[in-house]
């Protein structure tokens, strides 16, 4: 993947093009022992350590000028335990490979995000999630994990073993150690029926509680400068399998959602005045459709148009009010927003720094096409999100710091105390962690 490719001079760049780094050295360990050795050597040399996956974070969470650990050799499934219905995957395994391998074994994760390019450790460490009424983020499906800590030792944790580490490390931000393997709860492969249909902004907000309650997985996209949304409901199905036809799939998912959308973004970037008109056309381009397929083909879709993103979790009860404020802000601002706003939900979980920690949450994600100025829009949106005690996605653009997080995360001190214990010398520190966790 180009997103993880390093330049000739040893520069690493992320997928969104927002962040680059020039580490002193890059290491690609082929085993947990090699990884532990690399951590110890870095410590002896006085270098900081960061692991990086496929670079799908928009923040500088993985940036270091020390040792950059690339996990592409630590991939694949270690074990499948059909008695406990768990699967242990190496940290560098891309989600798309995990999903395909599980499907071949007649297994699936319960819920997943909307892209699957990321590694399992990168996705979980930043709190990647999809949408669900009762099923949470990818990290909420973790049953155990293994990590190399600052002293080079290999620590395993679960609800029974090192439970205080388990509570935090499932979404550990790379601050507690380098994750080397993750054990996920899985279930027998099932079918989902997706129902996608346009709906007015006003109707979605008026009926949001009902749409949320009646569907296992509900999400929608609102197109700024319009009163239109596209809704998606995914529910378990007894079958039969009725996947999207190859031609229809290419036309809607590749041609419209990626190809034409890319051209529309280029036009909007060149001539911002055209954005509202393009938004009206875009919001009506996708017609209603229903299809039934195995989970990863329903939850995930290709995203080839490069963008920059900010996403906040607000209490689910505050969603409608927050979205109305966002729409009012866009309508009066003179901003030209060419990307839809994505809205999803998650139930409360028990992970220390999960965006859904201790509260039922709704996610609002704002995007801008890569190369267009996004600061004014994101700043105004962030002001609205933080007024509702919003918690930003750890891998997406935000300006919050430790002082803010200590107010919106009741268990923030629990995480920082564990970090003091596991990494007292701050081997895994970088500028981003200094900002969000404090020095």
Image (cartoon, helix red, strand yellow):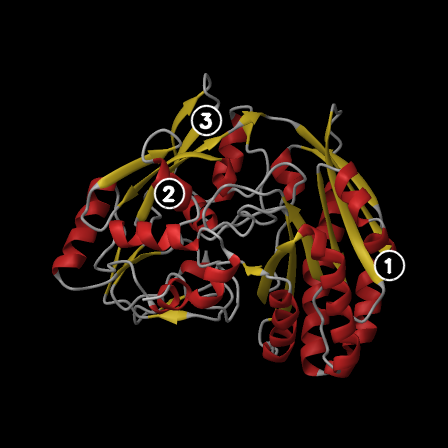
- Distance from label 2 to label 1 (Cα)? 43 Å
**Between residues 419 and 339, which one lies in front from this camera angle?**
419
Q: Quadrant of residue 107?
A: top right
- The residue that label 2 is drawn on is 91
Residue 63 visible in the current orientation: yes
* SS under mark 3: strand
- The residue that label 3 is drawn on is 86
* SS under mark 1: helix
Q: Which residue shows up at 73% across the image and 46% down it?
A: 249
Q: Quadrant of residue 368?
A: bottom right
- Mark positioned earlier in the residue sequence (2 or 1): 2
Picture disc at residue 202: 1
Q: Which residue shows up at 52% across the image and 68% down it?
A: 398
| Residue sticking out furthest to the top | 83
Q: Could you tell whether 353 is left or right of 188 in the image?
A: left
**Between residues 310 and 212, which one lies in front from this camera angle?**
212
């Amino acid at each position: 993947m180009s997103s993880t490719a390093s330049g000739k001079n040893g520069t690493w760049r992320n997928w969104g093009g927002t962040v680059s780094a020039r580490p002193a050295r890059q290491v690609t360990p082929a085993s947990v022992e090699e990884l532990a050795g690399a951590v110890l050597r870095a410590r002896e040399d006085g270098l900081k350590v960061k692991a990086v996956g496929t670079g799908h974070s928009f923040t500088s969470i993985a940036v270091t000028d020390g040792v950059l650990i690339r996990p592409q050799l630590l991939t694949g499934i270690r074990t499948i335990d059909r008695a406990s219905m768990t699967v242990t995957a190496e940290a560098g395994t891309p989600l798309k490979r995990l999903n395909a391998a599980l499907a071949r074994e007649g297994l699936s994760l319960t819920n997943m995000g909307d892209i699957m390019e990321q590694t399992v450790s990168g996705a979980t460490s930043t709190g990647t999630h999809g949408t669900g009424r009762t099923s949470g983020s990818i990290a909420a499906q973790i049953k155990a994990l293994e990590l190399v800590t600052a002293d080079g030792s290999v620590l395993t944790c679960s609800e029974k073993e090192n439970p205080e580490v388990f509570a935090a490390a499932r979404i550990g931000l790379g601050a507690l150690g380098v994750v080397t393997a993750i054990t996920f709860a899985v279930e027998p492969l099932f079918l989902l029926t997706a129902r996608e249909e346009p709906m007015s902004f006003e109707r979605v907000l008026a009926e949001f509680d009902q749409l949320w309650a009646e569907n296992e997985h509900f999400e929608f996209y609102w197109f700024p400068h319009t009163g239109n949304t596209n809704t998606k409901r995914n529910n378990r199905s007894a079958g039969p399998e009725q996947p999207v036809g190859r031609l229809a799939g290419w036309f809607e998912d590749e041609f419209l959602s990626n190809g034409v959308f890319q051209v529309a973004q280029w036009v909007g970037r060149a001539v911002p005045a055209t954005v509202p008109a393009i938004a009206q056309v875009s919001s009506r381009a996708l017609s209603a459709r229903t299809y039934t397929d195995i989970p990863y083909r329903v939850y995930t879709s290709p995203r080839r148009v490069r963008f920059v993103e900010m996403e906040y979790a607000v209490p689910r009860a505050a969603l409608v009010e927050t979205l109305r404020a966002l729409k009012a802000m866009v309508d009066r601002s003179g901003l030209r927003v060419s990307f839809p706003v994505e809205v999803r939900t998650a139930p409360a979980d028990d992970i220390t720094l999960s965006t859904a920690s201790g509260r039922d949450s709704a996610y609002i994600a704002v995007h801008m096409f890569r190369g267009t100025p996004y600061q004014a829009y994101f700043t105004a949106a962030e002001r609205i999100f933080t007024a509702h005690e919003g918690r930003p996605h750890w891998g997406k653009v935000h300006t919050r710091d430790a002082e803010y997080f200590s107010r919106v995360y009741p268990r923030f001190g629990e995480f920082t105390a564990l970090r003091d214990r596991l990494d007292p010398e701050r081997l895994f520190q970088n500028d981003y962690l200094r900002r969000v966790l404090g020095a």
